Image (cartoon, grey):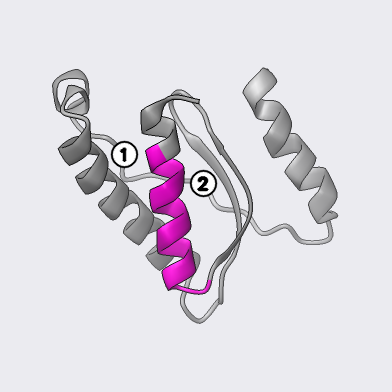
Amino acid sequence: MGPIETRLKQIISAVCAEHQAEIEELEVMPDHVHLLVNVDPQFGIHRLTKLIKGRSSRFLRQEFPVLKRKLPSLWTNSYFVSTTGGAPLSIIKQYIEQQKHV
């Protein structure tokens, strides 16, 4: 795990902790992030996502100037969200963990 990935995980963890969102699983991929999180529906996943993207973009670009030169922006405006429904969390966690090795 490199320094950018380590720092990104720290930032995501901090934002989630501040808003009482529990991280079930987190994997950073080269071009996206898998995040399984339990968040209060009244707060909203959209708000949490916006906060994570905003803070991580600002901090990572300040702390790692190479990101300013390589990418026009750190995140896109889009993201995918799905509820876990009836799927067991263990299966979803296993899927996310395995993404690193695909």
Q: Position of residue 44 (x, y in %)?
A: 47, 71
Residues drawn in magenta: 7-20
Q: Which residue is mark 2?
A: 80
Mark 2 packing: few (<14 Cα in 10 Å), some, or many (20+)?
few
Label 1 Cα neighbours within 10 Å, binned few <14 / some 14-19 / many ≥20: few
Q: CA distance from mark 1 to mark 2?
A: 11 Å
In the rendered image, residue 14 lying in the magenta stretch gets the answer yes
For the point 78% across and 39% down, which residue is it?
Answer: 94
Residue occupying the point 28% across, 53% down = 55
Which image quadrant is residue 86 in? bottom right
- Residue lying farthest to the bottom in this orientation: 42
Left or right of 75, for residue 2: right
> Is 55 a magenta residue?
no
Q: Main secondary structure of the magenta part?
A: helix
Specify whether 41 is left or right of 58.
right
Q: Residue at x 46, y 77 (%)?
A: 43
> Which picture quadrant has residue 18?
bottom left
Label 1 is placed on what type of residue? Thr
Task: Determine the secondary structure under disc 2.
Answer: loop
Question: For this rendering, which residue is in front, 39 or 83?
Answer: 39
Return the mark for residue 95. none
Label placed on residue 76 = 1
Query: Which kind of residue does numbered mark 2 sit on?
Result: Phe
